Image (cartoon, grey):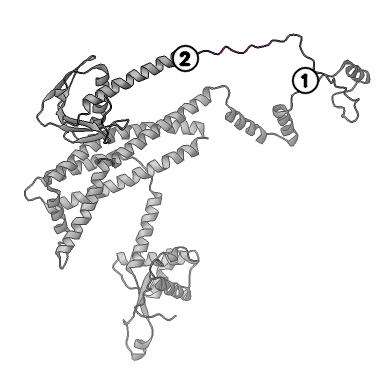
Amino acid sequence: MIFRPESVAIQAPGRLKAFAYLTAEKAALYRSIMRVFMESKERFALHLRSQQILDAIRICGLEDTPDQTEIEAALAQLCDWGNLQTRPDTSDVSTVEDFYKQRFVFQITNQGEAAERALELFQAGSCRKGELQTTALRDIRDLLQELKGLSREAEPDAGKIHRNLLTVHASFEDFASRAQAFMGSLQRNIDLQMGQTDQFASSTERLIDYVERFVSELVTAAEDIGRMICDIDDSGFEQLLQAVAERSTVDVVRTTPEDLESIAAEWRSHWGRFRDWFISRPGCPSGADILRGRARASLTTLLSVMMSINDRRISRIDRSNDFRVLARWFAEAASEADAHRLWRAVFGLCPARHLIVNDATLDDHEAHDVTAGTSWLDAPPLRISTRRRVSSYSRTARLSRIIDRTAEKEKLAAATHEETLRLLSAQSRFATRRRMRLSELEQFETGEFDLFLELLGEAVSAKVLADDTAEILSNDGCLRVKLEATGDGQTAVLHTPEGIFRGPDHWISVEPSSTEEVVT
């Protein structure tokens, strides 16, 4: 077998040959060779001869042990795909003839090593079970607390900052990937286990408790983590990035400002994704909010499934369960004749009661002593009456009287019109386009307070932190509300027909969402 020294396959753009050995005819042999190179590199043995590779494969106990010719052919093919490269073997050369002999050593390429690493990640990810990790949330919260303390130091320890950021990134990525796998498989498990009523019911109860516990922990942890992220940003996250970049390049022979900026940009990207997962932005809910919503929706689905299972157990009539029982009876039938009798008992046609046999036919059958097993071909003919026997009692049902609902419709229309006028009046009071304090409103009517309380509740729920500014649209999309904290600790006291409403004072501005003025 002849090799070209320094042979590395050059791939055309858009084509990737590094993974071709996974689907080739001798994929098992190729995989074994690549594993030998990966294991040898861990021992810092970078160059291997074909005989060394053959000996290592024989030790591994491959089902079909290859010979030297097959090993050389496989090595040549891996070199052609770019997973391996060859170098001249000039060791143990004692004569000129030995020097001119074509002997080569093999080395795994960066491309081949990356393919094996990717395959390891693929196998590890496919075997990983999805789960909702409350411990990961607590670990992230503790690490951020320590990172928050480091960010406030005048000269923070770069080593501690680097270790904390690495641990936070690894914990977050593992937590997010496992949560995605769990939520992705939840619906599939529900669909697959619906038929196994008893087994599914017992596991669903534990699953509901598991999801409820995680949701409660997520609500608390996400708020704490979001607050600490904002504190770290305010304390100077760029200073931490600079320390991490310098720490990462300590062992580099020559460091340029571009290298430091590249490392800082990479960590800045990680931190931005981490921040977006825990802190919502206008029009962009956080990953924690999305996960919490999906988890709550899954609870609703699981509870509805449990209710249907319980109803199926309690209800006397369940067509799907009856058909399953009937199918089991057919499967357990001792013979084909028993199956036919079961079919006749379940699906046999009922007598045609609207057909009447006359008295002459009945007398004829009694006279000839016709048994029930007599064939229709041999039995006397049946004389069916051509007229239906109609009962002498006939009840004629009268049409139900049509009820006139005009008065009720007018009453509903008047109430709707009155409610609309009340809402428009309330909107005209609030939608002044003026920035004012809540305490300036003071007095409310019933309709005004209902609308105001709805707008205020939506604006407050949109805030993540108490000092944030919230800007929302009303449910009907007519009003735009902006709510800002005053920061002076004042309390707003509002008088309503239902009582006195107290709360932290805020700046509030309400305006129509379109260019048109509110109709009064």
Q: Residue at x 35, y 20 (%)?
A: 417
Residue 354: assigned label: 1
Q: Residue at x 18, y 18 (%)?
A: 443
Up-down relation of residue 520 to residue 69 (above or below): above
Amino acid at circle 1? His
Task: Mark 2 vs mark 1: give the one in front.
Answer: 2
Amino acid at circle 2? Thr
Provide the residue span drawn in magenta: 394-404
Q: Residue at x 22, y 49 (%)?
A: 271
Nearer-the-camera pick, 75 or 436: 436
For residue 353, which quarter of the picture? top right
Mark 2 is surrounded, within 10 Å at the Cα level, by few (under 14), some (14 to 19) or many (20 or more) other residues, namely few
Residue 406: assigned label: 2
Q: Residue at x 32, y 35 (%)?
A: 214
Up-down relation of residue 230 to residue 114 (above or below): above
Residue 96 position, x and y percent, is 34, 91
Tell me if residue 399 is in the magenta stretch: yes
Q: Which image quarter holds the N terminus?
A: bottom left
Mark 1 secondary-structure assignment: loop
